[in-house]
Amino acid sequence: MKETIINKVQSSKAGKRKVRAKGLLIPFFCAFTGMLLLGSCRKYLDMDHYFKDRQNTDTLFTRRDYSEQWLASTYTHLRNENADVASKGYTPFNFISDDMFFGDRDDKYRRYKNGEYNEGDDQASWTSCYEGIRKASIFIHNIDRNREMDKEEIADRKAQARFLRAYYYWLLLRKYGPIPVVADEGVDYTTDYENLAQPRNTYDECVDFITKELATAAKDLPLQRTNRDAARPTKGAALAARAKVYLYGASPLFNGNKEMSDLVDNTGKPLISQAYDETKWAKAAAAAKDVIDLNVYKLFTAPFNAVDQTGTIPKTIVPPYNPKYSDKAFPLGWKDIDPYQSYAQLFNGALGFTANPEIIFSRVTEQGSEGIDMMVLHQMPYSLKGWNTHGITQKQADVYYMNDGKDVPTNPRVTGFTSNKEEIRPLPANVSMQYAYREPRFYASVAYNGSIWENTSARYDYDRYKQVFYYRGAPDGKQPSSPAFHIRTGIGIKKFYNPFDSFMEGGFVVPKPEPAIRYAEVLLIYAEALNELNGSYSIPNYLGTGNITVSRDPLEISRYLSQIRIRAGLPDFEGGVYASKEQLRKALKRERQIELFAEGHRYFDLRRWKDAPVEEATPVMGCNMNMTEQQRDLFYIPVVIPSMPTIFVRKMYLWPISYSELRKNRKLTQNPGWTMFD
């Protein structure tokens, strides 16, 4: 009878049995059933549900089909609980910061916002990531024996597995802080129970391991993929992920943070460096430059003629004339681009993943229970058969600039409403002038009160081009009969919505790729890291064949940051902003809040910057949802939203490790502020 992967063992020189599987180096969490990380080892090692025929490793990885199936199963852990952008449930981090919210799960939302989550709340990512890590390790150590793939195919697939393993570690590191980096060798499972447990590695050790793995993967990954392999990582994906890992490691929460001195391992060793190290910023900057220097990616721009003359796409928004930018072609100006469509089409499915020069990595989220189409369903008005529950805060609405780059007037706020005689693009009649003359990204992202939902794939004409209001008593406003189905702040979300999207009869939703990593984020990483430097540094490139010199050069920062601003139809920051590290840091934080809105960044940004104690504890403001249309002047006076609590305590910097994992691995320590029974 053939041996399965689970029971195939060999004897060591000393006679002890070790989990080797003839070169199949199974990580140590298969060495102690029910212990660290995965609970039941048998469950996760038994791959028979992936392969109909029982195979030992001598035959399994020699076959192309079985090897491809194994690698495909390793990818599955990128979904659900490990997706960055989802509608609810699996990944709450997109909805529990200070910018946006979901309003149809009050109990869960309140627990998250009050820091009352525990081992029963969204802990599946821990198990799922380590399961993916284990699968990737097995693949890496065995794919070389494949007899049906050539050397290039083997190298590519091994690099994919290495990317996945590093990416799963990154997702854990981002959420939980320092985590155990599993030994990449077989483990003697006859040793004492206590010796099988593994403590957490330091944050710097985790960063070092992950970034080295991503650099190694990048060497064998291709620059581009075909449509068929769109969801598989490229060289740029590995290098961009590497830049993100370095950026977080350089940030205040993890770089010389004495407030986290009590985050220690089982021996009392600090897991976060207590000494600030500027070279961490230099490594982040150089890693971002590695991506830029590939010369593969660029910011997506749409020409003005991209506007459909049939009217199925809204009228475009022309920035006010600026002598420095209006007459120059991109990237020096916006003469030849449509800033509104350039931003909107990035996310609404107007072009496929492989046709988009800006998206570097995407899980290419499937239409389904938690995909971006479901996010659109939550954003769509109730009157249009949407769920009308995803919205944004007044803070987020106010952070967008005016179309000339100035701040939005808030004291006092603009009063008055548009009329049918006015043409203030893209505003229809009866819309608050607070929403007039805003930057294009505002209109591509925000469903302000009175905005138009095109709904053009609906069967009937009367279901299209609906102007939606959130006043009390309106179909999409606050109503006693449907308390769960209204936008709590009176300000909704348009990002990811395509004018063709409709849930009405005959309607359909355009498929949309998930923007897990895109080029604009890389440029923002580069700018942020350069801004924090005082000295000049020479950092080896990812190949180790040369060095990248980085320093705080305002011209270099502006060269790349200005592209994001100009693509949005906004002038670059003035010289005084670039001259001041503090002013530019503030401007960069705001730019990330706008540019990366609803892409799963804000929750983690506020923590790594250590801004969460202020930003997330500030009361959530919004429109007065108790006002009817007859009281519309009062509707727009911001009020505190009592159903949306705001609190931040130190323990909320990092997610708690569940009690069940702590019990399995006695060397695993809890994050500060969380008790064994939280």
Image (cartoon, rainbow, N blue to C red):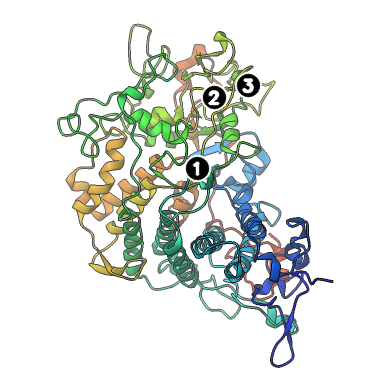
207 left or right of 439 in image: right
Mark 3 vs mark 1: in front: 1
Residue 655 image offset from top left, x and y in percent:
59, 58
Quick one: label 3, few (<14), some, or many (20+) residues within 10 Å? some
Q: How many marks?
A: 3
- Residue at 33% from the left image edge and 16% from the top image edge: 424
- Name the one closer to the observer, 83 or 629: 83
Secondary structure state at the residue bearing disc 3: loop
Name the amino acid, label 1.
Answer: Asn
Looking at the rendered structure, the secondary structure element under dot 2 is loop
Comparing labels 3 and 2, the label whose residue is closer to the camera: 2
Q: Which residue is mark 1?
A: 227
N-term mark: 2 or 1? 1
Alpha carbon distance from label 3 to label 2:
11 Å
Q: Residue at x 32, y 34 (%)?
A: 568
Q: Is residue 253 visible?
A: no
- Tag 3 near tag 2, CB within 8 Å: no
Disc assigned to residue 385: 3
Q: Which residue carries the number 2 mark?
A: 501
**Relative to 506, is 62 above or below?**
below
Residue at the extreme left? 323
Q: In which quadrant is the N terminus drawn?
A: bottom right
Tell me whether circle 2 and circle 1 mark residues in contact (CB < 8 Å).
no
Inspect the image, locate mark 3, and give the three-letter code of the amino acid beneath it: Lys
| Horizontal and vertical percent position of residue 74 | 62, 57
Q: Kindly report the distance in space between the C-alpha atoms of the residues bearing marks 2 and 1.
A: 23 Å
Instruction: Tell me if 32 is positioned left or right of 214 in this view.
Output: right
Badge 3 or badge 2: first in the primary sequence: 3
Mark 3 or 1 closer to N-term? 1
